């Protein structure tokens, strides 16, 4: 399933970012994390509706503790 594959890719990206050091212009090294949301196209969707569900999933990742990938399950959070 496409959303599951997207979550797997997101998880690999998330882990790579978490394990990396980023240098600021002043030379300071930072560790950062990323929260991601995944939504899959459903019949009748518009670009805006898919992006809205992905955005809601990203905010769910942050609410659940950050540094994670959250998938919007089919039929949930549609408006």
Image: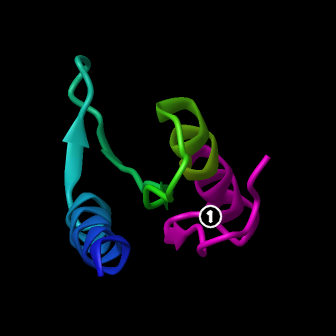
Relative height, residue 40 to residue 7 (above, below): above
Residue 26 position within the rendered picture, expressed as x and y whole percent measured from the top left: 26, 19
Tell me if 1 is positioned left or right of 27 in this view: right
Local SS, label 1 = helix
Residue 72 position within the rendered picture, expressed as x and y whole percent measured from the top left: 59, 67
Range of the magenta residues?
55-79
The N terminus, quarter of image: bottom left
Residue of label 1: 61
Check if residue 67 falls in the magenta segment. Answer: yes
- The residue lying at 55 percent from left, 47 percent from top is 44
Residue 62 position within the rendered picture, expressed as x and y whole percent measured from the top left: 66, 58
Q: How is the image coloured?
A: rainbow
Residue 51 position within the rendered picture, expressed as x and y whole percent measured from the top left: 52, 39
- The residue lying at 62 percent from left, 64 percent from top is 61
Relative height, residue 56 to residue 10 (above, below): above
Instruction: Tally the numbered discs.
Output: 1
Task: Find residue 63 and report its image quarter.
Answer: bottom right
Tell me if 63 is positioned left or right of 30 in this view: right
Residue count near mark 1 (Cα–Cα under 10 Å), binned few <14, some 14–19, many ≥20: many
Check if residue 74 falls in the magenta segment. Answer: yes
Return the residue found at the far top.
Answer: 25
Tell me if 61 is positioned left or right of 6 in this view: right
In this rendered view, identify the residue nearer to me: 41 or 71.
Answer: 41
- The residue lying at 25 percent from left, 76 percent from top is 5
In this rendered view, identify the residue nearer to me: 41 or 19.
Answer: 41
Return the residue found at the far front.
Answer: 44
- The residue lying at 60 percent from left, 63 percent from top is 66
């Amino acid at each position: 399933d496409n959303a599951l594959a997207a979550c797997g890719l997101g998880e690999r990206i998330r882990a790579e970012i978490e394990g990396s050091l980023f240098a600021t212009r002043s030379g300071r090294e930072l560790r950062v994390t990323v929260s991601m949301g995944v939504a899959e196209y459903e019949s009748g969707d518009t670009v805006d509706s898919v992006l809205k569900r992905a955005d809601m999933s990203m905010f769910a990742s942050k609410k659940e503790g950050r540094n994670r990938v959250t998938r919007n399950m089919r039929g949930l959070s549609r408006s």
